[in-house]
Image (cartoon, rainbow, N blue to C red):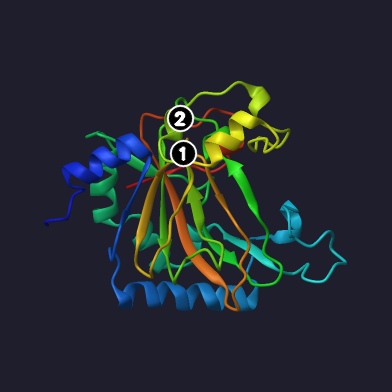
Amino acid sequence: MNFSSPNDVESAAFERDGYIVIRNMVTAQRFAELRTIANDHLRQLIAPIEFEVDVRYPGAPLDENSPGADTSRRLLQAFARDEAFRLWALDPEVKHILASLLQTEEGLSVSQCHHNCIMTKAPGFSSVTLWHQDSRYWAFDYENLVSVWLALGDEDKTNGCLRVIPGSHKLNFDSGRFDAAMFLRPDLSENKLLIKQAVTVELNPGDVLFFHSRLFHAAGRNLSDETKLSVVFTYHQASNKPINNTRSARFSSIPM
């Protein structure tokens, strides 16, 4: 079977910037099916769910008694929710692209511990996600994972699309650059200069964002009147093992 591969420019861009977007990678029929299932699970609030009030990021409801306390942030364990999500997570073309971006011929696995979710950014009570690297919350032998973010609808500034800092996956900072929750401290002048380099990643339905686990990214609130849905899985080389007795090892990864 023949698959499209990142061309030399795209591969170089991933190496340089820490992310690439492949436009129209998923057919309208496929993303519509995934969106229908996601909306059905969201409407029924099928567990497991992370609610906005659970994380209490800026803009989220303050407590369980506040308006919007039942607002979903993520439908967790997407891989186990429906065969359609499993087929997408293990899609041969996704595997082919990941092998190219990671420059590896060894086996790849999809994590069941990180991302593995449908992002459900709702209007009204969605929160702001501050600048962070996913790898700071994960524990693997080495920080070389890639997340695959499929847009199930339009993603833009109005509904809180991702912003990224190109090339930040190559940077190393001391702990003083971060707050207690491991977000970049916005009060530091050096962080302000870094954040000024950010770009907005706007997506159309069926577009797929591939981004490195060390890439700094953030997202705003959803100021539209519709929930923004995205399917996100994270992948690693089979030899890159989660560290025992950490949340990265709570569930076994799935070989592709």
Q: Is residue 205 left or right of residue 122?
A: left
Direction top: furthest residue:
174
How far is mark 1 from mark 2, CA to CA?
Answer: 7 Å
Residue at 45 percent of width and 74 percent of height: 35
State if disc 2 and disc 1 touch (CB < 8 Å): yes
Q: In the figure, residue 45 lies in which quadrant? A: bottom right
Give the residue displayed 51% in from the left and 68% down from the top: 229
**View extreme (right): residue:** 65
User: The residue under label 1 is which amino acid type?
Assistant: Ser
Q: Is residue 134 visible in the rendered structure shown here? A: yes
Q: Residues within 10 Å of mark 1 (few under 14, many from 20)?
A: many
Q: Nearer the viewer, residue 151 or 138?
A: 151
Q: Nearer the viewer, residue 59 or 87?
A: 59
The quadrant in which residue 11 appears is top left
Would residue 138 be visible to someone looking at this image?
A: no
Of 180 and 45, the residue lying toward us:
180
Residue wearing tag 2? 143
Q: Earlier in the sequence, mark 1 or mark 2?
A: 2
Residue assigned mark 1: 213
Circle 1: element type: loop
Q: Amino acid at mark 2?
A: Glu
